[in-house]
Image (tube, helix red, strand yellow):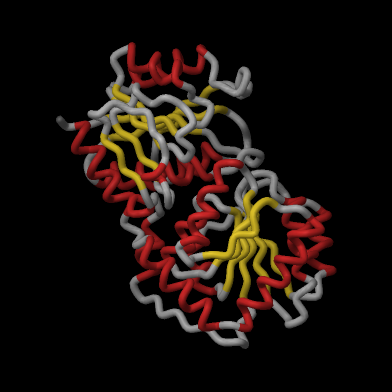
Amino acid sequence: MSRILFRCDGSSSIGMGHVVRCLSLARSLRQAGAQVFFLLRELGGGAQGKVRELGFDVLTLPGPDFINGALPEWDRLRTAEAAGEKGAGWVLVDHYAAREDYLEGLRSLGLRIAVLDDMADRTLTACSWLLNQNLGADALPYRTTVECVRLLGPEFALLRPEFHAARQALSREFSRRDAHVILTLGGGGTGELSIEVLRALDGVSSPLEIRCIQGGSDPVPAELRHAAGSSMHKVSILRDVRNMAAHMLWADLSVNAGGSTCWELCCLGVPMITLVTSEDQAMIARALEEHGCARNLGEWTPGRTAARLAETVRELIDNPDVRLEMSRKARRRVDGLGAKRAADSLLDLMNK
């Protein structure tokens, strides 16, 4: 049986996006017959629990953070040791702080390396298999060997099975009476930004019903509860959501960060207004707008972006035909089967 160790991290401060997409791929690999293990740092926020809930073995590393923005040598050695303990000849790394020397060090110990990446900001000649699920990935200057298998683009978006299932009976219709908005800005430390966005949405005169989705398992900050309660709109705050597809089916419009959630929204045809909350999201947000799937407001600045957000929400609510076209274009980009395609590709390579 093919065995692979996933090295990724997630927490309430850095978000859960890497863990969630790794779990999507891991589930497809397991369904295809592979045995998958996880190695995560002890950072809090429930990442290890999410992995265990889905039946995967989890090994842990102590919590100290990076050294000069990179994973330290002891992390690499423990990763190699964990792979040996589990009899895994492959390690999949989904971590921006795993630099070239980290990956080369794993390869020098006889391990085969797979990488999930978004930015092409490091040399990846150590890896045998590379996946970047984002629009525009094929234009990035990746430095890999000629032999490296490269899967680039949202055809390989790593979504959970429920998104493809929800898509099957989907029939999107929009009208000027629509009022359902989801606000989802990622899983890491987004409470303050959510407050600012909710206040900005008070600039939309027509009544909205807003579901403010917060990642992680930490308590909702009192300031966010107050912002929701004082809003002119009906605002619900939802924490640690387990049925994200259902909320996206409910939504007529989404205000969201430019991360992996975008591909879930595309799959279910939700028109988007994107905000860039970290460097790795900038390319995604630009590409989604260029392909007609979203309106990109860029990095958030309370004065300028707040007014633009309210204006853009009003414009899109008032123009259902525009939202319908955004929805159709988004659905054409992502069908929800990317994790299966990726798993089939990786398992084929592992079995050679």
Question: Left or right: 346 with respect to 94?
Answer: left
Q: Residue at image x 53%, y 22%?
A: 61
Instruction: Identify the image quadrant of the C terminus.
Output: top left
Nearer to us in this view, 340 or 318: 318
Furthest-left residue in this view? 352
In this rendering, does residue 243 appear at all? no
x, y percentage for residue 200?
Answer: 77, 65
x, y percentage for residue 24?
Answer: 39, 47
Nearer to us in this view, 24 or 332: 332
Q: Residue at image x 49%, y 59%?
A: 288
Question: Left or right: 5 with respect to 248?
Answer: left
x, y percentage for residue 304?
Answer: 78, 59
Q: Residue at image x 41%, y 35%?
A: 141
* 109 shown above or below 41: above
Nearer to us in this view, 240 or 301: 301
Give residue 89's quadrant in the image: top left
* 23 shown above or below 143: below
Instruction: Identify the image quadrant of the N terminus.
Output: top left
